[in-house]
Amino acid sequence: MALPKINPTNTKAWKNLEDYFKTIQDLHMKDLFAQDENRAHSFSITWEDFYVDISKNRIDKKGMDLLLDLAKETHLKEAISKYFEGDIINETESRAVLHTALRAPKTAKVFADGENIIPEIHAVKEKIESFTNDIVNGHRKSYTNTSFTDIVNIGIGGSDLGPAMVVDSLQFYKNHLNTHFVSNVDGDHVNEIIKKLNPETTLFVIVSKTFTTQETLSNANTIREWFLKSAPNDAIAKHFVAVSTNIDKVKEFGIDEDTVFPMWNWVGGRFSLWSAVGLTISLSVGYKNFESLLKGAHKMDTHFKSTDFANNIPVLLALLSIWYNNFFNAETEAVIPYSQYLNQFATYLQQGIMESNGKSVDRNETPIKYQTGTIIWGEPGTNSQHAFFQLIHQGTKLIPADFIGFKESLHGNIDHQDKLISNFIAQTEALMNGKTDINDSAPYKVFLGNNPSNTLFIKKLTPESLGKLIALYEHKIFVQGAIWNIYSYDQWGVELGKQLATNILKEILGDSSSKNHDTSTQNLIKHYKS
Ligand code: F6P
């Protein structure tokens, strides 16, 4: 039932990779290209509208084969089947991990607790569709009988980052509705959003899997109070809808059962944008586009599930990431989209990747002695070229980077697009080749190069291609967690801070019973209250 529990460092492949690393660590990628004129071709994959070039990496065919051996020895194939088949792979929470079922077709059969969950998923999708159409077309009215103009998504973490990133990325496809996101418990956040709203024409979507999250409930309550200053009590049911697994708590808030969109325990928060958590996406770009997003993700699921590892995009990107993280000791990874639309992509990935794989105890419940979760960061190019690229080119750290670009611009401005793509291609060329010209020998002008990158060149940013891209990173997370022998789908590490904040809040509000703090913490509380 559970995932295999193999310490990757005890495998033969790991030992072979350590030996291989010694032979390749000083080799320059320029030499790898010189030795193999077919390298660009044999280290690239064309799949659907994706062209993925992994040739600019510090590895040759032998090394790739060793990484594939690692996948084999850690039983990755078996793990992938368990993931898709709904086994309880999130053992520490006794849950299956089935976000992939959310984008499976109506004809599929996926079982959780012995029950086929596909009909239920599609029933909720139909509910999302008709609700979306009613709001977008103005059939569903506000309490003053006007059409809605604004949508506010109230949620945090996975109940915010996914929808916010997708709505921003697909703004080209947006309809007339204005969308806003409130997440932080910082009251200034909610108040700045409120300033822009007319209560008569605003719909609030409260998204919380648990419906107990402090930030989301505080924001929802603040908004409700503000709303009730001008609206009658019975208007709540018309203006507030919710997405949650906790139907009782939602009803307590005053939301009509008809406008509660259910989700399920087998969907992790950070992988939930495909469920009703994506309601704001559907409202913002229309249900058809939401469906296309899901369709793209499903295509990537099929690719991941059924493609040989040697040509499997998520598997290869995951293995390369392990290569740098565990053998080169790379500290971070950058994700650089050459599209302003993907401005929030790296922030979104931070939760997916770091909340999932930031673990230091393995699946045998033993402390881990090797590096796990990668640190992810990034900003769109070309802006980032004028910000942090200096350090990637000439700093002392090795920073593997994913470059994501689109062949076509959405507004079709070819002059800008040619310039954008020239930069996109030039950066990976510069990172790899560097510049060690002997005629220009000032040491500070030398670029050593040999900085690895992957290039994901996609035809066009569409809901479908975005769905593929997000699912690609989801599966990369899975592969890395499976090989590192960790539990990727829990997040116990966020609990302690929540508990301590609850205690400190009590003290701030005057409860003197729990004063068990170090002196620094005590002083900070005193300083706040003074
Ligand atoms: O930060 C922890 C976390 O549990 C995330 O995994 C989740 O996405 C977020 O909080 C929000 O939780 P909820 O949807 O239950 O409000």
Image (cartoon, rainbow, N blue to C red):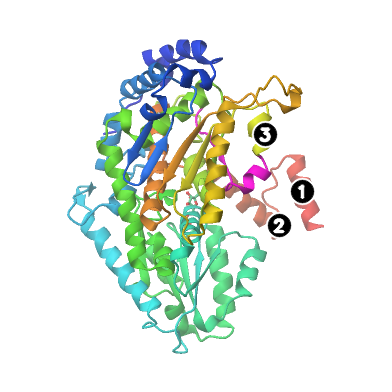
Spot occupied by residue 44 in the image (x, y as percentages of width and height)? 38, 32
Q: Residue at x 44, y 89 (%)?
A: 145
Quarter of the figure with residue 94: top left
Magenta stretch, residue numbers: 369-388
The crowd level at tag 2 (other Cα within 10 Å; few <14, some 14-19, many 20+) is some
Spot occupied by residue 452 in the image (x, y as percentages of width and height)? 53, 29
The correct choice, above or below, for 61 with respect to 424 in the image is above
Instruction: Name the residue that disc number 2 marks.
Output: 508
Instruction: Name the residue that disc number 3 marks.
Output: 391
Q: Residue at x 41, y 12 (%)?
A: 16
> Element type at marker 3?
helix
Q: Residue at x 67, y 49 (%)?
A: 514
Quick one: 258 or 109, which is closer to the camera? 109
Left or right of 463 on screen, residue 360: right
Spot occupied by residue 45 in the image (x, y as percentages of width and height)? 35, 35
> Element type at marker 2?
helix
Quarter of the figure with residue 87: top left
Disc 1 CB within 8 Å of nearest ligand 1 atom: no
